[in-house]
Amino acid sequence: MSSPITLPVRETDGQVRLDRFLRRKFTTLTQGRIEQMIRKGQIRIDGTRAKKAGDRLSPGMDVHVPQEIVIPEKKDDGIIRVRLKPEDEQWLRDMVIHEDGDVIVLNKPPGIAVQGGTGTTQHLDKMMEIFSTDDHGKPRLCHRLDKDTSGVLVFGRNPAATAFLSKAFAGRKTTKVYWAVCLGTPHPLSGEVRGWMIKAGSSKNPDHELMRRAPHGEPGAVFAITDYHVISNAGTKASWVALKPITGRTHQLRFHMAEMGYAIAGDPKYTCDREPIGGLSEQLHLHARAIRIPHPKGGILSVTADLPPHMVKAFDALGFEIFEGRDPFEHFRVDA
């Protein structure tokens, strides 16, 4: 017989009914299935058999459930997938770098999609159901990052907060700074990139889209502006560049750096004629380092996200030093 799964009740879960707690953890679990397992004595709370679906849980308790509680979903392609396992929950909770009653901010790893799309079976928007509350449901995305981009990702915890934060993004009341490792060293060392761009093709998945340069007036074209500053460089082969998007277009930073002739290391879509930087990971070296945004309750929320492992290795290899306490906004005008 397989050993049971232990689900700790955390402070973020609050005081919650057993059935609601379990449905947050396993999105395919039905009320009938929960009650059936309770009747069979398969669910225990701190070692004692659960009595009913409405049993109250408190932070610090442990809920023990059988392995069979993990109900897989079958997709049209015939592949069986598990929506959310306890280890996925811990993986997601470890991403949290700020949390309060209105806002959750994650440090998103590279390689995980923010939203679902064609062929995307695991994404953060769905997984955020583990932070659901009885009153407001799951946290909602306020903006997005490319699948291969890491860093700061903001969610609203209730409808009012989500609307407020989304309006701040749309109204350009936020300041976002990205760090990138680029091929070569841009000249001049600081400046602004601007121009018209448009989606090339008709992909329904944002991660599969490709942008191209567009003439002014082309139907569907959008105007994009990016400020940049070279923080350091490794001779002529590579540079550490801070990027501040003024607009928020799909793939904007990746497109702009490639258009300048200094593509971001590891980018398979937006390239330039420069030689790759030897010895680095093939992952995209673009990280949403920090954000300043108005908080729904007043004041400014400022959050900084640590670099992912592959970029830490790149910085070490290229001799780029990150000083403790360095202000990620120091090279740009701060709007928020």
Image (cartoon, grey):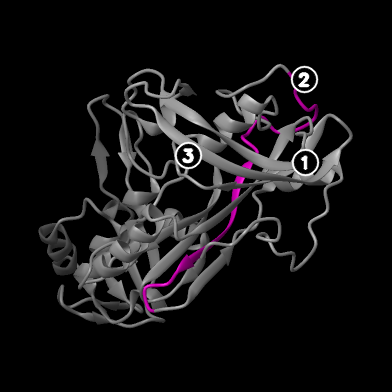
Task: Indicate whether residue 291 is drawn in magenta.
Answer: yes
The label number, if any, that marks residue 275 in the structure image: 2
Specify whether residue 100 is in view.
Answer: yes
Indicate the secondary structure of the residue bearing disc 3: loop
- Horizontal relation, residue 84 to residue 40: left or right: right
- Horizontal relation, residue 79 to residue 188: left or right: left
Give the image quarter of residue 216.
top left
Indicate the secondary structure of the residue bearing disc 2: loop
User: Magenta residues?
Assistant: 274-297
Q: Where is residue 26 drawn, in percent x and y?
A: 28, 56
Q: Where is residue 19 drawn, in percent x and y?
A: 20, 69
The residues bearing labels 3 and 2 have C-alpha atoms spaced at a distance of 24 Å
Against 19, is 244 above or below? above
Give the image quarter of residue 184.
top right
| Contact flag, marks 3 and 1 (Cβ < 8 Å) | no
The residues bearing labels 1 and 2 have C-alpha atoms spaced at a distance of 20 Å
Instruction: Specify the amino acid type for callout 3.
Output: Asp
Camera-side mark, 3 or 1: 1
| Contact flag, marks 3 and 2 (Cβ < 8 Å) | no
Instruction: Specify the amino acid type for callout 2.
Output: Glu
The label number, if any, that marks residue 146 in the structure image: 3
Pointer 3 or 2: first along the chain: 3
Which secondary structure type mostly characterizes the magenta part of the structure? loop
Indicate the secondary structure of the residue bearing disc 1: loop
The label number, if any, that marks residue 189 in the structure image: 1
